[in-house]
């Protein structure tokens, strides 16, 4: 993961039919911070719409992320599985009125042994089955909070 300690990375942004011109190679080469990624999301991942609508889009993403984490914390499935390689996709319709956040790329999701307990927040060590799911989710939530500060 190129030394990224946030538990997530921005792998691509598509706006409309063409990929946005995002300096992804630069982001991958450096250790990104919440502030770096917040600026990237704001510059490339939020539609160029009036400020009030932009704020609404960011609020919606933030709400969806928080709801997703709350649901995951209560889920017996999440408690018993490791989510290595899972991704989030953020969707905004063309006019910015509808948003969605979906968990995808679950091919490597695996059932952990019954004798093992994971919290998705502890660091990964060989054999402990930790995946950093909540580390990444908490940091992407922090990132969108930072986006919200910038938008305000």
Image (cartoon, rainbow, N blue to C red):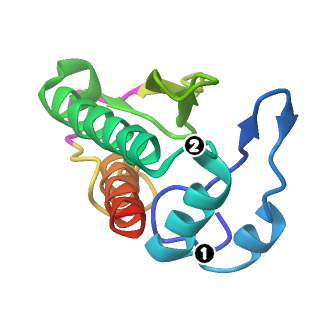
State the residue at coordinates (51%, 46%).
50
Q: Identify the image quadrant of residue 83.
A: top left
- Taking the magenta stretch, the answer to whether it contains residue 115 is yes
- Taking the magenta stretch, the answer to whether it contains residue 33 is no
Q: Nearer the viewer, mark 2 or mark 1?
A: 2
Label 2: few (<14), some or many (≥20) within 10 Å? few
Give the percent coordinates (x, y) of residue 2. Answer: 68, 70
What main secondary structure does the magenta stretch of the protein show?
Answer: loop
Of residues 35 and 111, the one nearer the viewer is 35
State the residue at coordinates (58%, 25%).
95
Which stretch appears magenta? 111-117
Q: Residue furthest left?
A: 74
Estimate the spatial distance between the alpha carbons at disc 2 and disc 1, rounded to whole Å.
34 Å
Decide if residue 2 is on the left or right side of residue 151: right
Decide if residue 6 is on the left or right side of residue 27: left
Q: On the image, numbered disc 1 is attached to which residue? A: 3
Of residues 128 and 11, the one nearer the viewer is 11
Of residues 72 and 63, the one nearer the viewer is 63
Label drawn at residue 49: 2
Taking 148 as reference, is 66 above or below it?
above
Residue 149 appearing in the image = yes
State the residue at coordinates (76%, 76%).
29
Where, quadrant-wise, is the C terminus in this rendering? bottom left
């Amino acid at each position: 993961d190129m030394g990224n300690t946030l538990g997530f990375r921005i792998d691509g942004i598509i706006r409309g039919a063409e990929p946005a011109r995002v300096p992804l190679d630069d982001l991958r080469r450096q250790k990104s911070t919440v502030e770096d990624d917040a600026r990237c999301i704001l510059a490339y991942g939020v539609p160029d719409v009036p400020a009030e609508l932009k704020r609404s889009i960011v609020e919606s993403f933030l709400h969806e992320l928080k709801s997703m984490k709350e649901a995951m914390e209560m889920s017996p499935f999440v408690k018993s599985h490791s989510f290595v390689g899972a991704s989030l996709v953020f969707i905004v319709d063309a006019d910015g009125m509808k948003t969605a956040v979906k968990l995808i790329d679950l091919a490597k999701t695996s059932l952990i042994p019954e004798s093992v307990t994971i919290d998705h927040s502890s660091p990964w060590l060989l054999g402990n089955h930790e995946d950093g799911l909540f580390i990444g989710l908490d940091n992407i939530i922090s990132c969108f909070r930072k986006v919200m500060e910038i938008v305000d």
